[in-house]
C-alpha cells in the first residue's frame, strides 16, 4: 500500500494539487489552513467565515500576503476568477467553499449544527466531497447525509484527528486482527461542570483563543457526549448507562476499571461492547481488547501489555483539525471516509435542561445557557421521546416546564420547522427508523 504522503507528493509533482473549501475560521479552521499550507498536494483554496477578518487572519497568520497570495470575493464567479489566477479566496459567503469549480472537497469547521447541514447539502448538490469537523451535525443527521453523498458518488466523512476518528483507527486495527474489542473510549482532561455558561468561561476562552461557547461545550460535558455518540454510531457499541460512567483513572487502571462488575476485578461495567470516557486519561483515546487464545495472551504478556484478560491499546494524542487534511486527501484520492455512522443510528445525543426551563422560553443550543447533551442509546431515546440536541436552535421554544437536569422530549418543545436540521432529521427518521 502506498502511503498518503507519496500520493500527495505525486499530485504536487504533477501540478495537480487538491483544493479544499473550508467553512469556519475559528481555532480549528485556522489550524487546518496552516497545516494544509505545510503539505504537498493539497491547498486551502477557499476560507469562508462570517468574519472576513478571521478568514483573512487564517491565511495571514500562516505567512500569506493579502492581495498577493489571497483576496476577497463575494460571489462564486469572483471566487472562480481568483482561483484561476492562482490566488486563494477569503469570503463571508459560504457558498464559495461548496460551489467554486476548482474545489474538490468542502470542510465544515463551524461546530454549528444548522451551518453544518447547509454546508453538507450544498457540497453534495455541487459534486464536492464533504468532511465534517462538526460532530454535532453528524450525530443528528449523519446517516441521511452519508446516504445522500453515497447516492451521488461522493464521500461523506467525519474527521481524522477528532476523537471519534482517532478511536476508530484503533478499533479497526484490533478488529482486523480478530481481537475481542470490549470497550472503546476517550479521556477527559477537565472535570464536568454542568452549570457552566459562556459567561462563566469567558476569561478561560479568551486565554485560549477559543469561543466561550466551544469551551462551555467541553466543560458541561456536551462535547464528550457528542463524541461518544459518534463512536457508537460508527461501531455499534452503546452506553453502559445513560451519560456513561465517567470514572477517574490512569491508563494502567483501564483493563481492570473497564471490566464487568461480575468479574470481581473492581470493574464498573454492567456489559461489554460499550463506549466510555475516563477522567485523567487525556489527551488521547483507548480501546480495551481481549483474546481467548492462550498463545496470544502469552505473547501480549511477553510484550509488556499486562497480565490480562483485558488489555488496553492507547493513543496518547489526537491532533484535531491538524489531521483533517488527511481525511480530505483520503476522500479525494482513495474515495474512502475516515469515519461514518456505518453501524446505523444506535445512539443519540439527547437534550437535558441546564437550569429550570419555563414554557414560552427560547432555547439557545450547544455550549449555551439553557441546555446540555447526554449520551443515550437510540432505543431508549425513542422510548422516552428524547429530543436530539442537534435539532435545537434559537427559534426552539419550550411548550412545557422542565426542571433542571430533566430530559427534554419532543413533546416539550416547538421546533423550528424551517430549520434544515429538522427537515433532514424527519427525512432520516422516515428512512432509517
Image (spheres, rainbow, N blue to C red):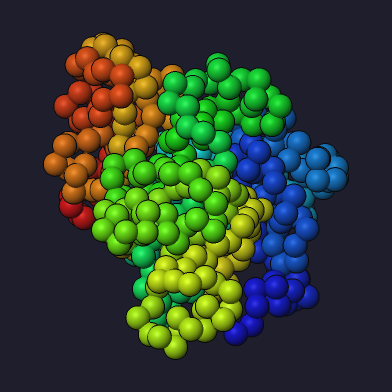
Q: Is residue 397 above or below residue 122?
A: above
Residue at position x 35%, y 81% from top? 292
Name the residue rendered at 78%, 75% in the picture: 13
Q: Is residue 395 left or right of residue 116?
A: left
Q: Looking at the image, which residue is at 78% across and 58% down?
A: 38
Determine which quarter of the picture holds residue 381.
top left
Near-viewer residue (34 or 305): 305
Camera sees residue 395: no
Image location (x, y in percent) of residue 57: 76, 36
Point out residue 215 in the picture as x, y percentages from the top left corner.
Answer: 56, 31
Q: Is residue 413 left or right of residue 308?
A: left
125 relative position to 279: left or right: left
Q: Quadrant of residue 209?
A: top right
* Residue 385 relative to residue 175: left or right: left
Please state which of residues 190 and 321 is positioned toward the viewer in this rendering: 190
Q: Looking at the image, which is closer to me, 61 or 173?
A: 173
Q: Which residue is most to the front? A: 264
**Residue 348 vertical position relative to residue 402 in the rendered view, above or below:** below
- Where 255 sits versus 249, above or below? below
Number of marks in picture: 0
Q: Specify the quadrant that holds the N terminus.
A: bottom right
Q: Nearer the viewer, residue 28 or 335?
A: 28
Vertical side of 201 occupied by 101: above or below: below
Please name the residue shown 49% across and 65% down the image: 312
Q: Residue furthest bottom?
A: 295
User: Residue 249: x, y in percent?
Assistant: 51, 48
Q: In the image as oriented, which residue stretches furthest toward the left?
A: 383
Using the rendered image of the protein, determine whether residue 403 is visible from the camera's viewpoint: yes
Amino acid at each position: 500500500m502506498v502511503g498518503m504522503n507519496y500520493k500527495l507528493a505525486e499530485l504536487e509533482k504533477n501540478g495537480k494539487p487538491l483544493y479544499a473549501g473550508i467553512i469556519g475560521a475559528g481555532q480549528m479552521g485556522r489550524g487546518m489552513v496552516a497545516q494544509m499550507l505545510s503539505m504537498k498536494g493539497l491547498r486551502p483554496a477557499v476560507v469562508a467565515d462570517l468574519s472576513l477578518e478571521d478568514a483573512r487572519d487564517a491565511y495571514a497568520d500562516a505567512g500569506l500576503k493579502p492581495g498577493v497570495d489571497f483576496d476577497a470575493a463575494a460571489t462564486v464567479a469572483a471566487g472562480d476568477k481568483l482561483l484561476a489566477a492562482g490566488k486563494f479566496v477569503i469570503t463571508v459567503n459560504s457558498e464559495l467553499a461548496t460551489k467554486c469549480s476548482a474545489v474538490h472537497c468542502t470542510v465544515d469547521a463551524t461546530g454549528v449544527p444548522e451551518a453544518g447541514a447547509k454546508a453538507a447539502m450544498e457540497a453534495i448538490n455541487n459534486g464536492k466531497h464533504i468532511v465534517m469537523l462538526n460532530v454535532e451535525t453528524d450525530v443528528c443527521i449523519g446517516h441521511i447525509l452519508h446516504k445522500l453523498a453515497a447516492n451521488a458518488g461522493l464521500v461523506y466523512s467525519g474527521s481524522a484527528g477528532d476523537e471519534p476518528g482517532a478511536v476508530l483507527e484503533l478499533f479497526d486495527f484490533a478488529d482486523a486482527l480478530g481481537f475481542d474489542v470490549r470497550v472503546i473510549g476517550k479521556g477527559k482532561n477537565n472535570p464536568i461542570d454542568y452549570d457552566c455558561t459562556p459567561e462563566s468561561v469567558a476569561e478561560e476562552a479568551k486565554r485560549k483563543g477559543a469561543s466561550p461557547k466551544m469551551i462551555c461545550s467541553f466543560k458541561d460535558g456536551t462535547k464528550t457526549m457528542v463524541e461518544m455518540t459518534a463512536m457508537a454510531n460508527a461501531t455499534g457499541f452503546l452506553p453502559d448507562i445513560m451519560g456513561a460512567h465517567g470514572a477517574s483513572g490512569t491508563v494502567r487502571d483501564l483493563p481492570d476499571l473497564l471490566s464487568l462488575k461480575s468479574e470481581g476485578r473492581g470493574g464498573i461495567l454492567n456489559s461489554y461492547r460499550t463506549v466510555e470516557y475516563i477522567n485523567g486519561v487525556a489527551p488521547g483515546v483507548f480501546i480495551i481488547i481481549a483474546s481467548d487464545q492462550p498463545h496470544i495472551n502469552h505473547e501480549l504478556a511477553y510484550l509488556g501489555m499486562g497480565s490480562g484478560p483485558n488489555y488496553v491499546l492507547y493513543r496518547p494524542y489526537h491532533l484535531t483539525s491538524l489531521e483533517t487534511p488527511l481525511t480530505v486527501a483520503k476522500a479525494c484520492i482513495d474515495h474512502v471516509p475516515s469515519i461514518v455512522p456505518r453501524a446505523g443510528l444506535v445512539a443519540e445525543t439527547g437534550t437535558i435542561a441546564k437550569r429550570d426551563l419555563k414554557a414560552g422560553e427560547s432555547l439557545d443550543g450547544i455550549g449555551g445557557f439553557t441546555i446540555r447533551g447526554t449520551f443515550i442509546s437510540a432505543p431508549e431515546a425513542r422510548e422516552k421521546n428524547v429530543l436530539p440536541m442537534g435539532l435545537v436552535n434559537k427559534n426552539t421554544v419550550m411548550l412545557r416546564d422542565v426542571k433542571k437536569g430533566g430530559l427534554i422530549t419532543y413533546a416539550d418543545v416547538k421546533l423550528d420547522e424551517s430549520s434544515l436540521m429538522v427537515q433532514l432529521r424527519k427525512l432520516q427518521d422516515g428512512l432509517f427508523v
